[in-house]
């Protein structure tokens, strides 16, 4: 009865959050378009493969034109290589474009910022897992779009916006100013999210983290693979009554099959893995049907022209998508379309 009551309240809050609180906060207070982009991506997921490929290619062409006309580095480098953006007519034509390395970015940082965005960008840095952090710029729209993609991907796993969630995730290390602590705390309260800093997780305090999860009683548990696996092993080694979330989302590190099995056995629910990096955030996420696969290919064994580096994989790993999903079949079984 208690879980049923919580689920009913969670459903009601989720509805209020998505229809009232979040649009008010994002659209009116922050003047962001995250929800508009989320609706766009939710519609796109049901397009046919031909429609998706046409949409992707039209956006690639616009991006190539923008880079050539507005980014000094690309215009100079592509011209020197004898390539014009209009020469790229098929995916195989990308082989003519010079690769962009991290050293290229560091040496030509200012020339890689598009002219219309100079002075208007946000800045981030990678974690430095390949040896040295890489600083990069991104736009306000890019930030809003990546948040929308993350919301859609997490929702596939049943971790929808406004649901009660615990994140065992990275956080600040050291002293944090009071003003920032208050701001972050209020933000998480509105999101119905409790964050447990995985940087402080160790063998001696595993039970404290588990008690915090029990006390909050989340619908969704989200976390680093290694952190959730440590907690799962603790539960398996020392069984005790504990709260059972409805779904678990893992990320930030590679999820091995034995880790998935241990986490699912300990917490009694399904694990959904995600793939991403600091530069782009969420790149791929598992859905209940698992109708698509993201395969990691080694540069020495396969050639591809879309490079993605991530701490979750070796620095020289490349990605390609296989096993295209059938949107119609997925629609029949998707929780988002069958949920009452």
Image (cartoon, grey):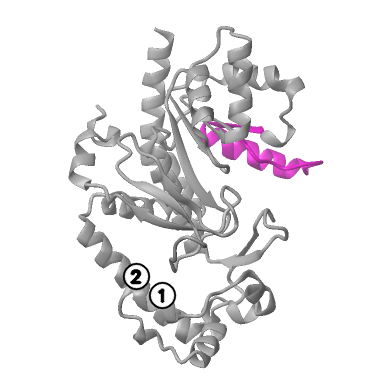
Note whether 185 is above or below 89 in the view shown.
above
The percent position of residue 137, horizontal first and vertical second, equals 60, 67
213 lies left or right of 65: right
The percent position of residue 164, horizontal first and vertical second, equals 49, 28
Task: Answer whether residue 194 is magenta in the image.
Answer: yes
Note whether 145 is above or below 84 in the view shown.
above
Q: Work out which quarter of the rendered image holds the N terminus and state it.
A: top left
326 lies left or right of 217: left
Task: Kindly indicate whether the residue at mark 2 contacts the one at mark 1 (C-beta within 8 angstroms).
Answer: yes
Residue visible at 40% across and 44% down in the picture = 153
Q: Which residue is mark 2?
A: 59
State which region is magenta: 168-197
Q: Work out which quarter of the rendered image holds the C terminus and state it.
A: top left
The percent position of residue 51, horizontal first and vertical second, equals 21, 61
Residue visible at 23% across and 33% down in the picture = 333
Report how far apart the C-alphas of labels 1 and 2 lie in the structure. Answer: 6 Å
Residue visible at 63% across and 25% down in the picture = 230
Mark 2 Cα shell of 10 Å, populated few (<14), some (14-19), many (≥20): few
In the foreground, 141 or 32: 141
In the foreground, 145 or 111: 111
Q: Which residue is mark 1?
A: 63
In the foreground, 53 or 139: 53
In the foreground, 30 or 67: 67
- Farthest front residue in view: 301
262 lies left or right of 37: right
């Amino acid at each position: 009865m208690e879980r049923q009551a919580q689920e009913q309240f969670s459903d009601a809050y989720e509805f209020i959050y998505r229809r009232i609180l979040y649009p008010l906060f994002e659209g009116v207070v922050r003047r962001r378009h995250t929800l508009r982009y989320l609706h766009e991506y939710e519609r796109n997921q049901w397009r046919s493969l031909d429609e998706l490929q046409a949409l992707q290619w039209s956006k690639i062409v616009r991006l190539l034109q923008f880079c050539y006309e507005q980014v000094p580095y690309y215009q100079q480098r592509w011209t020197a290589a004898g390539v014009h953006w209009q020469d790229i007519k098929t995916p195989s034509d990308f082989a003519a474009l010079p690769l962009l390395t991290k050293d290229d970015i560091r040496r030509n940082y200012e020339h890689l910022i598009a002219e219309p965005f100079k002075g208007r960008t946000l800045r981030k840095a990678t974690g430095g897992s390949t040896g040295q952090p890489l600083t990069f710029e991104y736009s306000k729209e890019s930030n809003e779009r990546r948040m929308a993609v993350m919301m859609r991907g997490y929702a596939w796993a049943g971790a929808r916006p406004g649901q009660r969630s615990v994140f065992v995730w990275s956080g600040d290390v050291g002293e944090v100013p009071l003003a920032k602590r208050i701001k972050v705390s209020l933000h998480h309260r509105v999101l119905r999210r409790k964050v447990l800093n995985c940087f402080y997780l160790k063998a001696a305090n595993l039970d404290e983290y588990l008690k915090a999860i029990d006390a909050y009683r989340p619908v969704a548990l989200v976390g680093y693979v290694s952190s959730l696996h440590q907690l799962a092993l603790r539960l398996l080694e020392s069984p005790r009554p504990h709260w059972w979330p409805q779904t678990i989302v893992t990320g930030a590190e590679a999820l091995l099959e034995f880790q998935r099995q241990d986490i699912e056995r300990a917490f009694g629910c399904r694990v959904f893995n995600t793939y991403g990096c600091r530069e782009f955030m969420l790149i791929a996420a598992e859905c209940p049907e698992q109708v698509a696969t993201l395969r990691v290919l080694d540069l020495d064994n396969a050639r591809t022209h879309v490079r993605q580096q991530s701490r979750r994989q070796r620095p020289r790993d490349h990605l390609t998508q296989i096993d295209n999903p059938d949107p119609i079949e997925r629609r029949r079984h998707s929780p988002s379309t069958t949920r009452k």
